[in-house]
Amino acid sequence: MTQAKTPNLFAAIDVGSSKIAVCIGYVRSDGHLEVVSCARSPSTGVHQGIVVDIDRTVGEVESTLQVAKQPFGKLQIDDAVANLNGIHLSCLNATGSSVTHKGEVSEKHIRQALHTAQAVNLGAANVMLHVLPQQYIVDNQVGIVQPLGQAGKRLDADVHMIMASSNAEQNLTKCVTRCNLHNLQLIASPLASANAVLDDASRELGVCVIDIGHETTGVALFVAGEIRHTGVLPWGGRQVNQDIAKSLFTPPQAAEQLKELHGSVVGHELDENEITVPGVNGRPDTRPPKSLFSQIVRAVYERIFHEVAAEFERHDLSSEFGSTRIVLTGGGSKIENLDYLASEVLGLEAYVDHPKICPAPSPDANGNSVHDQIYVADGVDATELNDPAMATVVGLLRRRVVGRIKTHQARTAKTRGVTSTAARSVYRWLGGNV
């Protein structure tokens, strides 16, 4: 892969609570994405999706990025897209309007309708991250995707807005732009995960993506093809580790290993086979039955699914949620029989899904490639990316947010101090996929 063949490389960066994942890719001439390098490393400066140690996070992002950039030598990459996560994310569905005096919708009228929809009090501590059009209505004609040029006297725009903590946004921006990535786009984590595991058909039929991460669980609800709700809950796989460690009195590292070896939520209720649990501080190992271990794991995931249902009840979306299917993804979804438990608790059909990555077709291929496919170049392990834990970073690669993406452009920096890397916010309206 030569520099001439990849003039527009960009970095997708998942800044998570357990890992930093970086993928470098570009858009091919046929419109498909190709991943040319990836790397991941442990994350210790992020808690529940929020940066709590800037210097540590900068170092971890930069070192992971350098590993991913190794195949390209000193090739400069300026563009990046990263995920903004945390329970500070909130959403609102609203409608804005404008009047078309000449009887035809122009770009000005679209901007006015979208602008009036945002007439909400965010408070001094919040910023608008995304404004996502759901549908346009011209006079009484609903379901219009692109109103430009339509005949009519009134334009209404139904939009889904995602708000974020300004401090969390600024701190994440600071961490990424200090790594000499000067053009940064931020996408809410639940939207990124949905990008990785959904296609247009599943969105149209109605689906709820539940992304179970290390310390948070993101939810994204789609009804009739449009986003209806976005949220983040303070529960994740780490809670399972903690409950195992406390209940069985074993070190946290051992608890995580036990979860990976024996973790299951259905099917071991009567299994009296014993498992070996290491003791703490030299205490002897214990051997509880597998049924007890399964009950501990199951209890946490039941709580997560009950919290998901409560989230939609709080926002008066229970009926919309109740007519969807459940897609489970994220590193915390890799528990045996988790889909059965989700179906049991939520009363909906559920399945675990992962990104679909495949090797790039050979030059003599007939060109019948799958729409919106992501390929990997020679030397990149597709199996590593076809993992629910990599859903966020793969979804960031797609950068598919129909609406506004918050873009930061860092000033040219000779040093890497706070002043030289201060970011200014620019709002850009996108007519479709980036």
Image (spheres, helix red, strand yellow):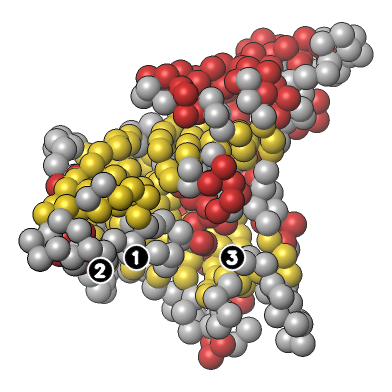
- Tag 2: Cα neighbours inside 10 Å, few (<14), some, or many (≥20)? few
Vertical comparison of 39 with 301: above or below: below
Upstream in sequence: badge 3 or badge 2: 2
**Which residue in the protein does label 1 denote?**
431
Q: Are marks 2 and 1 in contact (CB under 8 Å)?
A: no
Q: Say which residue label 2 marks.
A: 149
Q: Mark 3 points at which residue?
A: 372
Whether the residues at callouts 3 and 2 have beta carbons within 8 Å, the answer is no
Q: Counting other residues with Cα less than 10 Å from the Cα at mark 1, is it few (<14), some (14-19), or many (20 or more)? A: few
Q: Can residue 259 be seen in this view?
A: no
Q: Is residue 270 above or below residue 278?
A: above
User: Do residues under tags 1 and 3 come within 8 Å of each other at their CB atoms?
Assistant: no
Find the distance from the CA under tag 2 to the CA under tag 1.
15 Å
Q: Position of residue 53 (x, y in %)?
A: 37, 42
- Quarter of the N terminus within the rendering: bottom right
- Which amino acid type is marked by label 1? Gly
The percent position of residue 336, horizontal first and vertical second, equals 77, 29
Place residue 360 in its image quadrant. bottom right
Q: In which quarter of the image is the C terminus?
A: bottom left
Which-is-in-front pick, marks 2 and 1?
2
Q: Which amino acid does label 2 sit on?
A: Gly
Q: How far apart are marks 3 and 2 (CA)?
A: 28 Å
Circle 2: element type = loop
